[in-house]
Image (cartoon, rainbow, N blue to C red):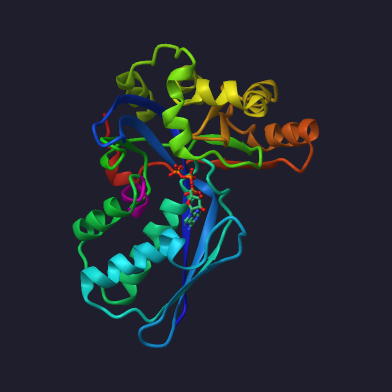
């Protein structure tokens, strides 16, 4: 029996790095917003008993044990005691090593798909524990909804956000390793971070005009300094009509918040200026599920 699941991407509307921990990782405060597009497609089908096979259609993504989906499936097998008999094929649509969380989202999709296929042997809490062991962002993708991420990003609290926001994304086509972005973030002076409380308050009933001045990424200045094309794309988003232009996560994908109804036109201007070799996407964030939004 084949099944197929969409693994969505995210942007970080706000990302502050609070401290380096003794283990070398960093405590952060970040606002994750899931996106309608782009999304990877994860196809799960049955293989011979004892067989686990993971392949993708993207040259930059390893097949087999190097793939996060493989690690997710192994963790699921270990935790449930089930022998793998799974073939996992990934159609990669999310740019790779791009700050959009693609690998983490794929891994979460595999955990959810396997759990569903086998009659939900693991509770959401157990899945969360497996997800955290795979990577800081994986837990967010188990139930992608606007959230504040603290700790390494895995301590999640739902953030009410009652409407989608239009965004345009652009990716310059080269990867940035998250480790590089964290290690180099102190090389360039940082502007003061806007108040996180103000961001969360503005998100509840979001307008792109109110949110744009509150967007922030502490990893961004060092990335813009090292990679001028990324700085050009941030400026290009604003010149094309966005209300802000920022790096998402550890980059190099940039996003801009759009005035309502402007996403497609802004994307078209960006393509006209930079050419259609540039990867771009006009999309929307996913709003909170209705039960997560309480009436004032
Ligand atoms: P984040 O925003 O969570 O920091 P990212 O978008 O920057 O993540 P990914 O696309 O998840 O980065 O890829 C990071 C690395 O993981 C790449 O070097 C890639 O080769 C490897 N990788 C392993 N499995 C996958 C997968 N299923 N999809 C994408 N990359 C994968």
Image quadrant containing the N terminus: bottom left
Q: Residue furthest bottom?
A: 48
90 magenta-colored = no
Which residue does the image show at 38% across and 15% down from the upper left? 194
The answer to whether residue 190 shows anywhere in this view is yes
Q: Quadrant of residue 50?
A: bottom left
- Relative height, residue 146 to residue 1 (above, below): above
Q: What is the total number of numbered labels drawn onto the structure image?
A: 0
- For this rendering, which residue is in front, 239 or 224? 224
Quadrant containing the C terminus is top left
The reply, left or right, for residue 259 in relation to residue 264 is left
Q: Which of 26 and 266 is in front in this view?
A: 26
Examine the structure image and report whether residue 141 is included in the region drawn in magenta. yes
Q: Is residue 249 visible?
A: no
Report the front residue among 178 and 294.
178
Look at the picture and state if 205 lies above or below 57: above
**Residue 11 x, y percent position in the rendering:** 47, 38
| Magenta region, main secondary structure | helix
* Quarter residue 129 falls in: bottom left
Name the residue rendered at 59%, 25% in the picture: 226
In percent of width and height, residue 190 lies at 44, 14
Residue 203: x percent and y percent? 38, 28
Q: Residue at x 63, y 35 (%)?
A: 263
**Rendered view: 169 above or below 91:** above
Q: Is residue 90 above or below residue 143?
A: below
| Stretch of the chain drawn in magenta | 137-142
Residue shown at the point (47%, 31%) measured from the top left: 181
Give residue 78's position: percent from left, percent from top: 24, 70
């Amino acid at each position: 029996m084949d099944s197929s699941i969409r693994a969505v991407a995210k942007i970080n509307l706000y990302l502050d790095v609070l401290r380096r921990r003794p283990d070398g990782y960093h405590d952060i405060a970040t606002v994750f917003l899931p996106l309608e597009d782009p999304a990877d497609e994860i196809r799960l089908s049955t293989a011979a008993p004892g067989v686990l096979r993971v392949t993708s259609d993207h040259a930059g993504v390893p097949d087999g044990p190097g793939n996060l989906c493989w690690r997710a499936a192994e963790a699921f097998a270990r935790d449930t005691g089930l022998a793998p008999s799974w073939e996992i094929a990934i159609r990669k649509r999310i740019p790779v090593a791009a700050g959009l969380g693609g690998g983490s989202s794929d891994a979460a999709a595999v955990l959810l798909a396997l759990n569903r296929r086998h009659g939900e042997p693991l509770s959401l809490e157990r899945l969360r524990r497996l997800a955290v062991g795979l990577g800081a962002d994986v837990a967010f993708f188990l139930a992608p909804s606007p959230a504040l991420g603290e700790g390494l990003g895995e301590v999640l609290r739902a953030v009410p956000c009652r409407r989608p926001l239009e965004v345009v994304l652009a990716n310059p086509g080269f990867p940035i390793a998250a480790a590089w972005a964290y290690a180099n973030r102190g090389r360039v002076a940082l502007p003061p971070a806007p108040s996180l409380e103000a961001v969360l308050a503005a998100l509840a009933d979001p307008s792109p005009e109110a949110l744009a001045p509150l967007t922030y990424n502490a990893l961004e200045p060092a990335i813009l300094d090292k990679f001028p094309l990324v700085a050009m794309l941030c400026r290009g988003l604003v010149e094309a009509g966005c209300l802000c232009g920022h790096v998402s996560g550890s980059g190099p994908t940039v996003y801009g918040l759009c005035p309502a109804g402007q996403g497609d036109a802004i994307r078209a201007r960006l393509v006209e200026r930079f050419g259609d070799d540039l990867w771009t996407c006009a999309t929307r964030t996913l709003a909170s599920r209705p039960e997560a939004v309480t009436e004032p």
